[in-house]
């Protein structure tokens, strides 16, 4: 596989290229999601765990904007609180993935030599291992299951991917004239890594980061769907969809709203990542 | 060519070795005593002693690995503590279902993706191309577990189509019509996910290929459009598609558990999740091993096909 993947290249943004209004709509929607997740406790929302048996499986109404579930809990509030799990897993896992994979990838591409060849061989072997199976196996037997453990497992599983992308991106700029000029001037390695290389691989890193978050959020959703994420009654988008399966015939809203929330979130992330990539004209590196 | 394949084969053996070590030590990587992980905290000392003996847990860990790998190579993956059946026979009954799902979904995905991508690439930014690109981008953001839930909601529940809902699966050998009906929604779901990826990759590669000089040359020779598209442009554009298909099919082997879980289709994914739910450690270990090796073999196979399609790759 490795032979077919193009190494990414970096070009400066072309003049006259625009991000477009849809890009900013997506940024706005994501910002709204993040703000709502952070400020959920201060928003005028009904307690997501409060069970009101007078309104069970109700459709959307003024009092419950998105209706209630089979236990009379408010769906809107559960979606907002549920987004915390997705956001925490998405950002936490990518923090670990980039925290470990990015310095290693940059160092390997800059130093080359034996350090690079050994590390790269190890990472390619790890990449051949189907990560999703490993993640499921570890998460399922590492009890009791907590959000932090899920974040750690997914984060570590993403390290080889991040490493491959960042190493490829750094390789493309590490032999540029300005890097050699900096070396000739006697700059320290640290200065070259942070001031010369980092700004030039940032566009690739950012668009890959966004797509990575989308992938991790999808994975968490699938895990929750299988009952392998945070334990109920804590809401998450995935386990809301999972719980709604049994009452799907009576209350389809219960499936549709969390699905919509998740899909819109992923669509925005993918769209922003894709736009940034074509804005900076980065050749595609598949996640 | 031969040298290239030998090099790949050596790498393959190395990776399979790492995978076997990984699946074997899975239980030792986890905190706590293996017997507690398998039997739970309430197990009696007598049961723990039996388990220790059965797994050879009191021998040195390297020796344990060699005993285990010796058994595995003889096709013996152990006997489940929960169901008292052989893990290997459980896997043998589950695997054909995965195979059927993969074949159905891939046939659908390729049958849709290849003609549509070729059509799209002929007029980039034309009407058809824009509709398909926007549509495939939207589908890219809908996870399979949502697609399958919505399909079940609308088709099996609202429309009431027979034999498509949860737990309507019957084996192919007992009634193949109902079997195909019950697999239609999951196969369609997996096909959508694959189609999106294949379409996007083939479209962008085709657009790039059609700008090459040999295409202009073929045109100026007056060759028919169909011949140019299929004979001249398709082959050089299909390398990335094949690579992705390898990764994707491997991913289906490991990742179709979501649709299987929802509809109660007893393939490997469903069996894996059921094994996890009942803490059937040996079953999980066996499936992890078989699926991981399967994924690696599929990738190896596609690498081989790619080197046939584009011989330059094996010569670098």
Image (tube, rainbow, N blue to C red):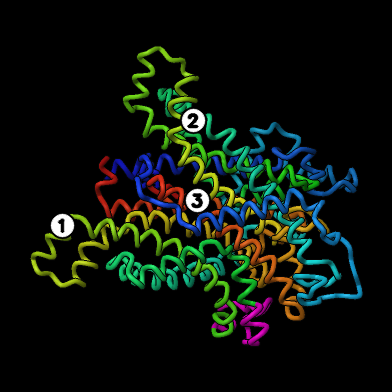
**Span highlighted in magenta in the image:** B153-176
- Give the residue displayed 66% in from the left and 78% down from the top: B153
- Give the residue displayed 34% in from the left and 21% down from the top: A180
- Give the residue displayed 90% in from the left and 48% down from the top: B42
Q: Mark 3 = which residue?
A: A273
- Answer whether residue B170 is magenta in the image: yes
Instruction: Count residues near mark 3 (Cα–Cα under 10 Å), then give few for <14, some for 14-19, many for 20+.
Output: many
Tell me the number on the disc at residue B301: none
Residue closer to the observer: A262 or A149:
A262
Pinpoint residue B175: horizontal percent, then vertical percent: 58, 84
Distance from label 1 to label 2 (Cα)? Answer: 40 Å
Is residue B14 visible in the rendered image? The answer is: no
Badges 3 and 2, same chain? yes
Distance from label 3 to label 2 (Cα)? Answer: 28 Å
Host chain of mark 1: B
Please tell me in which quadrant of the rendered image residue A15 appears: top left
Q: Mark 1 = which residue?
A: B214
Label 1: which secondary element = helix
Q: Mark 2 = which residue?
A: A119
Which residue is farthest left?
Answer: B221
């Amino acid at each position: 596989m490795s032979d077919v993947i193009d190494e990414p290249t970096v070009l400066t943004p072309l003049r006259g290229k625009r991000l477009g209004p849809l890009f900013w709509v997506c940024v706005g929607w994501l910002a709204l999601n993040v703000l709502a997740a952070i400020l959920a406790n201060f928003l005028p929302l009904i307690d997501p765990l409060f069970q009101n048996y007078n309104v069970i499986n109700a459709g959307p109404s003024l009092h419950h904007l998105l209706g209630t579930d089979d236990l009379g809990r408010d769906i809107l509030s559960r979606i907002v609180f549920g987004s915390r799990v997705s956001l925490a897993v998405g950002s936490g896992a990518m923090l670990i993935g980039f925290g470990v994979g990015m310095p290693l990838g940059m160092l390997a591409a800059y130093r080359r030599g034996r350090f690079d060849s050994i590390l790269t061989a190890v990472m390619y072997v790890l990449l051949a291992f189907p990560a999703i199976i490993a993640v499921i196996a570890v998460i399922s037997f590492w009890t009791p299951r907590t959000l932090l453990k899920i974040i750690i497992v997914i984060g570590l599983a993403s390290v080889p991917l991040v490493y491959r992308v960042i190493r490829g991106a750094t390789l493309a700029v590490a032999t540029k004239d300005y890097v050699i000029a900096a070396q000739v001037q006697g700059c320290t390695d640290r200065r070259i890594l942070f001031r010369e290389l980092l700004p030039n691989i940032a566009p690739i890193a950012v668009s890959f980061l966004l797509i990575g978050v989308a992938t991790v959020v999808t994975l968490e959703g699938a895990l929750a769907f299988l009952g392998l994420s945070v334990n109920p009654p804590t809401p998450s988008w995935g386990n809301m969809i999972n719980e709604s399966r049994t009452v799907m015939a009576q209350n389809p809203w219960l499936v549709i709203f969390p699905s919509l929330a998740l899909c819109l979130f992923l669509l925005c992330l993918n769209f922003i990542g894709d736009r940034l990539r074509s804005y900076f004209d980065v050749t595609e590196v598949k996640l | 060519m031969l040298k290239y394949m030998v090099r790949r084969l050596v790498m393959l053996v190395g990776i399979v070795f790492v995978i076997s070590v990984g699946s074997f030590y899975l239980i030792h990587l986890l905190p706590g005593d293996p017997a507690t992980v398998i039997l739970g905290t309430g197990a009696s000392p007598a049961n723990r002693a039996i388990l220790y003996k059965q797994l050879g847990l009191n021998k040195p860990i390297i020796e344990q690995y060699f005993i285990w790998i010796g058994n595995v190579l003889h096709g013996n993956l152990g006997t489940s503590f929960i169901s008292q059946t052989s893990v290997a026979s459980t896997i043998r009954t589950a695997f054909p279902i995965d195979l059927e799902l993969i074949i159905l979904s891939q046939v659908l995905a390729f049958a849709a993706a290849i003609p549509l991508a070729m059509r799209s690439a002929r007029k980039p930014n034309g009407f058809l191309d824009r509709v398909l690109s926007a549509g495939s981008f939207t589908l890219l953001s809908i996870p399979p577990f949502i697609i399958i839930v919505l399909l079940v909601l609308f088709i099996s529940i609202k429309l009431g189509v027979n034999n498509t809902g949860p737990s309507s699966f019957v084996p192919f050998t007992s009634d193949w019509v109902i079997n195909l009906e019950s697999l239609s929604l999951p196969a369609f779901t997996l096909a959508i996910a694959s189609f999106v990826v294949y379409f996007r990759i083939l479209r962008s590669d085709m657009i790039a290929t059609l700008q090459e000089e040999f295409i202009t040359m073929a045109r100026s020779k007056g060759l028919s459009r169909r011949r140019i598209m299929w004979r001249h442009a398709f082959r050089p554009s299909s390398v990335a598609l094949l690579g992705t298909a390898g990764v994707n099919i491997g991913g289906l082997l490991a990742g179709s558990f979501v649709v299987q879980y929802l509809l109660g289709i007893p393939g490997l994914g469903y069996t894996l999740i059921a094994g996890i739910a009942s803490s059937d450690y040996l079953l999980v270990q066996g499936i992890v091993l078989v699926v991981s090796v399967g994924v690696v073999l599929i990738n190896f196979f596609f690498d081989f096909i790619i080197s046939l399609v584009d011989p330059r790759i094996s010569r670098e």
